[in-house]
Amino acid sequence: MIVFAPKESDPKETRAAMNPETAKKLVGLGYEIRVETGIGLGSEHVDADYEVAGAKVVSDRAGELGAADFVARVQKPSADELGKLKKGAMHISYMDPFNEGELLKSMADCGATGVSLEMIPRTTLAQKMDVISSQANIAGYESVIVAAERLNKILPMMMTPAGTISPAKVFVLGIGVAGLQAIATAKRLGARVTAFDIRAEALEQAESLGAKALRIDLGETGSTDQGYAKELTLEQIAKQVEGQAKACADSDIVITTAKVFGRK
């Protein structure tokens, strides 16, 4: 069985679908691993690292797509590359299935099987394959680091002989995996954090991390069995916007992590 991991086409994408450690494990299981030259440069893995792991570094992208039994990548494929897959091949990547109907049809037409990583259930059994939570966790951390670097003031309170500098105010919208990490990171850097979510249990989690919970009476709300917040009515949205306006205006940093699965 041949597994091929191509280099990502988007120059902004620094991740790789295969790292040398994973390649070594799959080689040990008996798979023939092929990776496109330069696949790991964005994540600081040179081609030689893959060769040491037992993978074959190749440059004929089109030919390898046609030969592979499994194709693994981070971002969704282009329609042009789908036509190069051999019939019966399995393609594994992000797919954005709710917004990419034509892409999925093209995959079906060429006889390939698509595995959308976003659709893996967020269960204990599937935790190692959960690409949403792991990346959201990093995004919540990174958002605070980027904001702290760009803000023209410091985050913690500082008492100096020249006077006291008040802590920066951070407002986090959405208290899921990314939001909780953003709260924790901002608190560790000394900021004063306020957080909002329509789910009562999420507000309690924010408070356990030291954030002040912004509570807005929206009437009946809830969450799905996957843990996502249920969509609000137009009246609830109007109330939410009104309640958040003061917090946004009073904040130095506003971080929006709220995400509805399948929606842009």
Image (cartoon, rainbow, N blue to C red):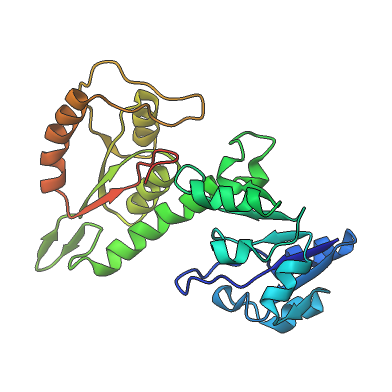
Picture mark count: 0
Residue at 58% over, 40% down: 119
Q: Is residue 137 left or right of residue 166?
A: right
Residue at 24% over, 24% down: 233
Q: Quadrant of the N terminus?
A: bottom right
**Residue 96 can be seen, yes or no:** no
Front residue of this view, candidates 142 and 51: 51
Locate residue 122, reporting x and y percent.
Answer: 58, 36
Q: Is residue 146 left or right of residue 261?
A: left
Q: Is residue 48 left or right of residue 235?
A: right
Please, is residue 93 above or below residue 62 in the view? above
Q: Is residue 209 left or right of residue 218?
A: right
Q: Quadrant of residue 159?
A: bottom left
Please, is residue 204 above or below residue 192 in the view? above
Considering every residue shown, the one lying at the far top of the view is 220
Residue at 11% over, 33% down: 242
Locate residue 223, reporting x and y percent.
Answer: 41, 24
**Residue 254 can be seen, yes or no:** yes
Q: Quadrant of residue 153?
A: bottom left
Residue at 67% over, 66% down: 84
Please, is residue 87 above or below residue 261 in the view? below
Locate residue 163, reporting x and y percent.
Answer: 9, 63
Front residue of this view, candidates 45 and 161: 45
Locate residue 85, reporting x and y percent.
Answer: 70, 62
Q: Quadrant of residue 32?
A: bottom right
Considering every residue shown, the one lying at the far front of the view is 109
Front residue of this view, candidates 246 and 257: 257
